[in-house]
Amino acid sequence: DAKTTQPTSMDCAEGRAANLPCNHSTISGNEYVYWYRQIHSQGPQYIIHGLKNNETNEMASLIITEDRKSSTLILPHATLRDTAVYYCIVRGSGGYQKVTFGIGTKLQVIP
Amino acid sequence: GAVVSQHPSWVICKSGTSVKIECRSLDFQATTMFWYRQFPKQSLMLMATSNEGSKATYEQGVEKDKFLINHASLTLSTLTVTSAHPEDSSFYICSASPAGHEQFFGPGTRLTVL
């Protein structure tokens, strides 16, 4: 799996958009970008994934650069409940593919 | 949506005893499940891949005789920590995937070995 680089921590004001960057310069053509988050003392939660097109769901938007070497997860209106560690992961498709977690970004939403 | 459960959610045991943790996919079948361990303030570390009807595949450095994995059905995988010691105290998390890309994670089991 390609390696990813994320900032260790970020703050975001409640109600504002949270933009979480991720670099994955060694991503290969068949690898997807996945985002998960982990709220304290809970299991990780799937957020979104994409290959090369931008994606949006009820939780977030995923913007992938044209060269696919970086991406940004956008939480459009951050709430206090969005405070969590966010993991950007690059891997092949298929449920049998294991997920390798990095350190992630600790997002603190501030009232 | 796909739901993965774990039981128990927390367990305290004495050193030297064995502890079994269950991981269930509630509304889908999963031929493959994964087991992770997470120490405080650290990221999740993959321990092993559990395959229904066959032997689990362990990551380097994980003792297969200490962490016994049984994936006896398409909805249940168990992790048994044998002869547990205080250094085995951790947060154990499983994941599974229905047909498709996403993996869904269980809520985790906090193990404390006294």
Image (cartoon, coloured by chain):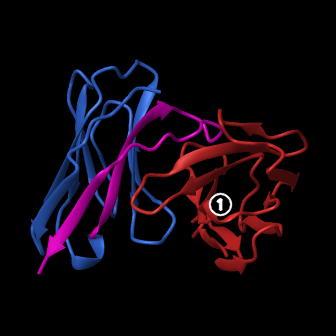
Chain colours: A blue, B red
Magenta segment: A83-111
Which amino acid does the dot numbered 1 rest on?
Asp
Q: Would residue B75 be counted in the magenta stretch?
A: no
| Parent chain of label 1 | B
**Residue indicated by mark 1:** B88
Q: Quadrant of residue B13?
A: bottom right
Compare residues B33 and A77 and report the one nearer the observer.
B33
Q: Position of residue B99 (x, y in %)?
A: 66, 46
Q: Position of residue A37 (x, y in %)?
A: 38, 59
Q: Position of residue B95 (x, y in %)?
A: 62, 55
Quarter the C terminus of chain B occupies: bottom right
Does A17 appear above or below B68? below
Q: Secondary structure at mark 1?
A: helix
Does A101 appear above or below A13? above
Residue at 40 percent across and 40 percent down: it is A89
Q: Quadrant of residue B86?
A: bottom right
Q: Would residue A91 be counted in the magenta stretch?
A: yes
Quarter the N terminus of chain B occupies: bottom right
